[in-house]
């Protein structure tokens, strides 16, 4: 019908104008329809990833409220002022009369009690004691042990000059005839052990002329010393003895 109306126009120029305008409108509509299909806008990656990933789980439900009995009530201790009368907040239903003296019950707590005691305890008592038990004095500590005795040595070493002062009996040696004829003299040094009774025992030669040693040992064996006492006990003494052989002029 539309074509027939266009073609049936009397003016051919007007007919071509209408045809061109119609084609132009069709071209414009086609371009408007093809442009969105050609130029595709890229989707943001953040939106794509959020779409592909599963949504997070819902948050856990809040914990149930605590019961009213479980809540600890903060108790503020009441402060008392000395020499100030304060009216009571509530009047007790039953009045308790405190008893003093001998008629006072044993359930009263002693002011001298300690933390952790029990009602009816004894003043100045001990924690963990038995109620009604008899106080027993602490046992007397044992006396200190006696001092250890000082060990006394059985033998000491004393110099020859010190021990010579304790010499009680000294026998002079006999000059050997052979040494006298050979005009030999000098000192014979011996090592001796003085027993607890003062006698000389265990003689040993340190140095000296061989011709003079026998005479010196025979004389020293007869010597007697004063016993050496250490801590009230006689002990043996090891010392050195010098025997002099000197030719007379």
Image (spheres, rainbow, N blue to C red):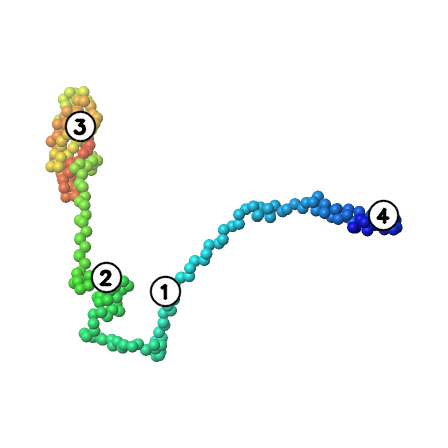
Return the disc, 2 or 1, that comes first in the chain's sequence.
Answer: 1
Residue indicated by mark 3: 204
Q: What element carries label 1?
A: loop
Between the C-alphas of marks 4 and 2, the distance is: 129 Å
Q: Where residue 10 appears, x then y in whole percent? A: 87, 51
Q: In which quarter of the image is residue 67?
A: bottom left
Which residue in the structure is indicated by mark 2?
A: 126
Q: Distance between the residues labelled 3 and 2?
A: 76 Å
Residue 69 is labelled as: 1
Instruction: Tell me where residue 51 appears, x and y as whole percent.
Output: 57, 47
Decide if residue 159 is in sight here.
yes
Question: Mark 3 touching mark 2, by CB under 8 A?
Answer: no
10 Å crowding of disc 3: few (<14), some (14-19), many (20+): few
Report, in whole angstroms, how far the alpha carbon at label 2 lies from the one at label 1.
37 Å
Q: Mark 4 points at which residue?
A: 16
Considering depth in this image, is 86 or 199 the residue closer to the camera?
A: 86
**Secondary structure of the residue carrying numbered label 4:** helix
Question: Earlier along the polypeptide chain: callout 3 or callout 2?
Answer: 2
The answer to whether residue 130 is above or below residue 212 is below
Camera-near label (4 vs 1) is: 4
Q: Earlier in the sequence, mark 4 or mark 1?
A: 4
Residue at horizontal 70 percent and vertical 43 percent from the top: 38
């Amino acid at each position: 019908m539309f074509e027939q109306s266009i073609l049936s126009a009397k003016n051919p120029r007007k007919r071509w104008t209408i045809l061109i305008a119609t084609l132009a409108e069709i071209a414009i509509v086609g371009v408007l329809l093809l442009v969105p299909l050609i130029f595709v806008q890229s989707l943001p990656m953040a939106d794509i990833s959020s779409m592909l990933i599963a949504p997070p789980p819902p948050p856990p439900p809040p914990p149930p409220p605590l019961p009213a009995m479980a809540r600890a009530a903060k108790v503020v201790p009441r402060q008392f002022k000395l020499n100030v009368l304060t009216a009571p907040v509530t009047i007790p239903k039953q009045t308790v009369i405190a008893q003093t003296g001998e008629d006072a019950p044993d359930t009263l707590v002693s002011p001298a009690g300690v933390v952790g005691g029990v009602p009816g305890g004894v003043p100045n008592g001990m924690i963990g004691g038995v109620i009604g038990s008899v106080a027993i004095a602490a046992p007397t500590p044992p006396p200190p042990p006696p001092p250890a005795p000082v060990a006394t040595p059985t033998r000491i070493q004393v110099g020859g000059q010190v021990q010579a002062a304790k010499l009680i009996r000294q026998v002079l040696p006999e000059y050997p005839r052979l040494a006298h004829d050979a005009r030999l003299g000098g000192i014979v040094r011996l090592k001796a052990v003085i027993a607890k009774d003062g006698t000389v025992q265990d003689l040993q030669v340190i140095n000296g002329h061989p011709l003079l040693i026998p005479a010196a040992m025979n004389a020293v064996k007869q010597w007697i010393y004063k016993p050496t006492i250490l801590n009230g006990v006689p002990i043996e003494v090891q010392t050195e003895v010098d025997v002099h052989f000197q030719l007379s002029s």
